[in-house]
Image (cartoon, rainbow, N blue to C red):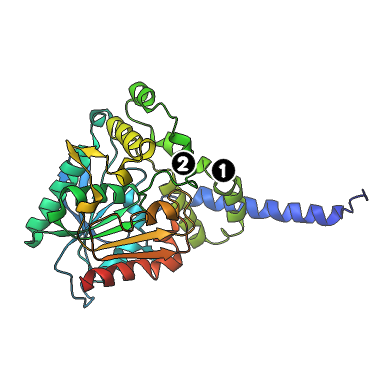
Amino acid sequence: MPPVDLDIARLGEEMEAYGDRLRSVMERLCAAGEISRGVTPREVVYREDKLTLYRYLPDPSAKVDLNPVPLLMVYALVNRPYVTDLQADRSMIRQLLDAGQPVYLIDWGYPDSADRFLTLDDYVNGYIDRCVDRLCQEHDVEQVNLLGICQGGVLSLCYGALHPERVRNLVTMVTPVDFKTPDNMLSAWVQHLDVDLLVDTEGNIPGELLNWTFLSLKPFSLGGRKYVDTLERLQDDEALANFLRMEQWIFDSPDQAGEAFRQFIKQFYQQNGLIRGEVELGGQRVELERIRCPLLNIYAEKDHLVPPAASTALRGRTGSSDYSELAFPVGHIGIYVSARAQSQVPQAVGAWLNER
């Protein structure tokens, strides 16, 4: 093997320059202060236990015809829903308002020991149903539009199957339906998990445990490489604030109510009960064919948490005669924060809802 030709002087210069950039970024990190999150004005319209239902307020100067049917956004129980309103140029909520949708969002809050025994029935037939009641009263309607994201899409499908008369249109986004596709690494990991031992030992499942599980799916790209690559992009205050805002959201992980977590892992992941029609909530079986309203299914082509095949499995399994799909070449989070998705996804959802 020929000897390695190293230019020691140039190597030293590169290391010194890298050190200077690192020091500059560290100085700005230390001086960054509190990073704002959420940009769209909102008001509380309902509270129950840890849940808060928000109404988002449209720009009063915007001349937009509002859809008479309110839109209820149902986010996952994991992480926090403010990622849908992260900053001015990355706000799905603001874009939906501009598209004429009266936007409401369920914030699940932070479960504590008092919530250990909450079940999926409590979330779907309890909390979501009572939020739908509130919206129907507010707008004097009998049905609402639902937009469910990730696990929130699963909960929305369950609600639509159990209460089809309450849902006018249903939008699912990066939502798993088949939980055992061959490329679903997360599913492969939990197949042999002793979830009973975990819940009986921990009670509520620590959000930090789940967060590090998700990061471990792609340890190199979501770990070391992300921070090395990011160093080159944090040379101005705006880029730094954007980075910190996203990092804040990634590590803002609520604990999970123990019994609901137990049910979700067993019935959905380990038994793949949703696609097989075997999930039971509140003594009722969740049958997807009972969903007959128009349905828009949006998925991300580069999603490592919910592979495309896990989402497209919904096709042909509901009773809807109006089923559409939209695919975007982004990842799981990129579907609602990337620049490309911001310029297309909310507008597509708004147009689809307005047509119906």
Q: Position of residue 27 (x, y in %)?
A: 57, 50
Name the side, left or right, on which 131 lies relative to 247: left
Residue that appears at 62% across and 51% down: 228
Q: Residue type at mark 1? A: Pro
Of callouts 2 and 1, which one flags the residue occurring earlier in the amino acid sequence? Answer: 2
> Helix, strand, or loop for circle 1?
helix
The reply to whether residue 259 is visible in this rendering is yes
Q: CA distance from mark 2 to mark 1?
A: 13 Å
Relative depth, front residue between 331 and 275: 275
Instruction: Note whether 285 is above or below 139 in the view shown.
Output: above
* Residue furthest out toward the bottom: 63
Pointer 1 residue: 219
Q: Quadrant of the C terminus?
A: bottom left
Label 1 packing within 10 angstroms: few (<14), some (14-19), many (20+) = some
Q: In this rendering, is residue 111 above or below 10?
A: above
When asked about the image quadrant of residue 138, the answer is: bottom left
Foreground: disc 2 or disc 1:
2
Badge 2: residue crowd in 10 Å (few <14, some 14–19, many ≥20): some
* Of 183 and 345, the residue lying toward us: 183
Could you say where residue 200 lies in the image, as x and y percent from the top left?
33, 22
State the image coordinates of residue 151 (x, y, percent, origin top left).
33, 47
Q: Which mark is residue 186?
A: 2
